[in-house]
Amino acid sequence: MSLVESPSAVAAQPVRGALGRLARSELRLVFGRRRNIVLLVGLSLVPLLLGLVLFLTQDSALGGQGPGFIGNVTGNGLFLVVAALFICLPFLLPLTIGIASGDAVAGEASAGTLRYLLVVPVSRTRLLGVKAMGALLFAGAAVLSIAIVGLVAGAAFFGLRDITLLSGTTVPLLDGVVRVAGVVAYVALSMTGLVAVGLFFSTLTEVPVGAMAATVVVAIVSGVLDQLPALHAIAPALLTHHWLGFAEFLRLEPDWHVLGQGLALQAAWVVIFGALAWSRFTTADVSS
Amino acid sequence: MTHSGAMTEQPMPQMPTTSRRRGLSNRARWTVPLVAAAAVGIAFAAPPLLASADSSGLPTISPEQLAAQVAAAPQQPLSGTVVYTARLGLPALPFKDVGGANPVSLLGGSSTMRVWTDGAERSRAALLGDVSEYSVVQDGPQAWTYSSTDNAVVHYTLDAADTARYDDLSAKAAAGDLPVTGDLPTPAEAGQQAVAMAKQYSTVALDAQTTVAGRDAYQLVVTPKSQTTLIGRIVVAVDAKTSTPLRLQVWSRSDTKTPSLELGFTDVSFGTPADSVLSFSAPPGASTKDVVVPLPEEGAQAPAVPGTLPEGVTVSGTGWDSVVQAFGVDVPGLLAGDPAAATSLPGAKRQFDSKGAQQLYDQFAPENKRGSGSPIGSLDTSALYDQLTTVVPEGHLLTSALLSVLVTDDGRVLVGAVPGATLQALAR
């Protein structure tokens, strides 16, 4: 009965080092799982394929065309990072993150391993924290894999040179690299809200696919609602509203206020859905 | 599945000492998200409320004094963010199809611009798109526009002779002996004149002091006396410290809740911007187009005498009810980008007194250019025209919250801040 009734009952006698061991095993689990590795590889194929296609077509009539930053890539490989992130942002990144974070708790529940995890002498709060850390690090790894492969592929295909900003000003390569690093960091941080949402859904169900799908749906519906002029009033609160704010880094003078707003919005989603996930997970009746 | 059943239903005598040592019941745990949501709500709602809470304490002044202050104030070096919102009641347009930051998007919806100026000759304005930007940079006698979507630069310059004349003029202006016909009114006089002129057709008053972009501001309200115009009132918020206009709102008579047109700073700081912001050089790889702009002749410099209109243009009505009528304009031809049609415009090669207006005109005036570099870009202007206007017996009518335009089938164009029916009656 003790297992069922309360998390703190099982964690009554915390064992020194248990949290660290749990965290390490969670990281091994997340980054060692074949599905997750395939996801990371798939994401890193995006800049590679994009670079290859642009490289092959750059001398044709279609060269230098495309939405977002795709047109700029052939001129400067650094833009491949931004263009790949731009392409992955609406769907592929939310999908990857939805899979990882939706699986975090529901996956254990569905495999019947959650009750064994709860026997670990670590409180449910900390266990949830470890799960959140695993999902967050995976989200970061997903963004980083796009960025690193994009940088390498961009440098190989097109070379890196001084970067022309959206404002038409050309800044030195080092400045450009710092700005693109800012873009990558901002995109990675923009995913934290979605991770929290996924984690919450994951605590609701024992069917991981349900949690994953719900998480992806949240991101996509939010993106759609953001496009509707009629919902102008609630748009600033939508999860995806500031996702494209990364473009700020590519303007002449980045407006830190805009970037701050984007990060504050993510923080708000993390706080609310983190709290929801905590309430659910620490009160849930775990039976599998 | 031995571990089943809701825990709350179980009698658990030992709970207070062991399992509930954190002292939080299930219900209490579920209040945490509520508290978190409330805290987040407050954190996001409070700063704007606090910012707008205190806006009193400015000395009371009259509209004339305010106008005089604005006229007297030197142009401030500043940088800031300007948000422009148009609720003109135009049909919904596929603005997303325009692609990226594009001046056409100013027709409707909300646009954000960044502006920088050193208060004298150099300035930059950037219209922000999601991942694009349309920049206009002015540096003395030359100007550039850059569209990040097309990676295209348009460079506006004067020819050599005009540049010399421009330099000469600006040197004279700096020395303070600009050849001006007649006496320049003092700022106080100019302010009085402006208010007096406005008072002829409108009531001018000061509204409650407000806060714009975090700065205390006076609000000058101009309300038309006419009951037939579309314009309800015009409100200008003027910074109390620097007398810089910070916000312009145009309210229509039909919508009293939100302004139909709003242009205002959301963020402003006074100080000379960095040199890198105010200079421009065409980025490598961009398509560049040079346009030589003729400087107006010495004689044309003097402001046009009121009452002399370009040929083919008449004005009927007075004050706010004025309707401008132009004859012999081939609007559909113009929209189709037909260069021949451009010559049918009354005063086709218009010259403006202000350089800014000239640039604006040159930028939007049909220049036989389509596609790359053109602000209209690949937009199908004829389709846009059909979408915006409705067919009436007299021709095509465009009605918006503030302005009506009637293009008659016999080539007349009527424009006025009056209801469309008034224009139709005039055209008959």
Image: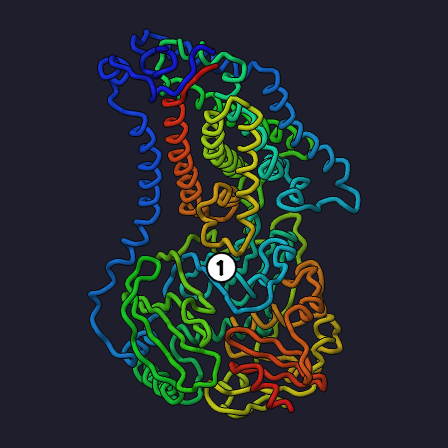
Quadrant containing the C terminus of chain B is bottom right
* Colour scheme of the picture: rainbow
Task: Say whether residue A119 is left or right of residue B295.
Answer: left
Amino acid type at mark 1: Arg
Above or below, B150 relative to A88: below
Question: Residue at horizontal 56%, vertical 49%?
Answer: A166
Question: Residue at horizontal 61%, vertical 59%?
Answer: B95
Farthest-out residue, right: A60
Residue B112 position within the rendered picture, expressed as x and y whole percent measured from the top left: 48, 57
Residue under label 1, please give it.
Answer: B124
Above or below, B18 relative to B97: above
Residue B159 position within the rendered picture, expressed as x and y whole percent measured from the top left: 62, 70
Residue toward you, B100 or B67? B100
Above or below, B423 relative to A36: below
Question: Residue at horizontal 37%, vertical 65%?
Answer: B246
Q: Quadrant of residue A158?
A: top right
Above or below, B357 relative to A226: below
Q: Residues within 10 Å of mark 1 (few under 14, many from 20)?
A: many
Which chain is home to disc 1?
A: B
Residue toward you, A251 or B396? B396
Residue B32 position within the rendered picture, expressed as x and y whole percent measured from the top left: 32, 32
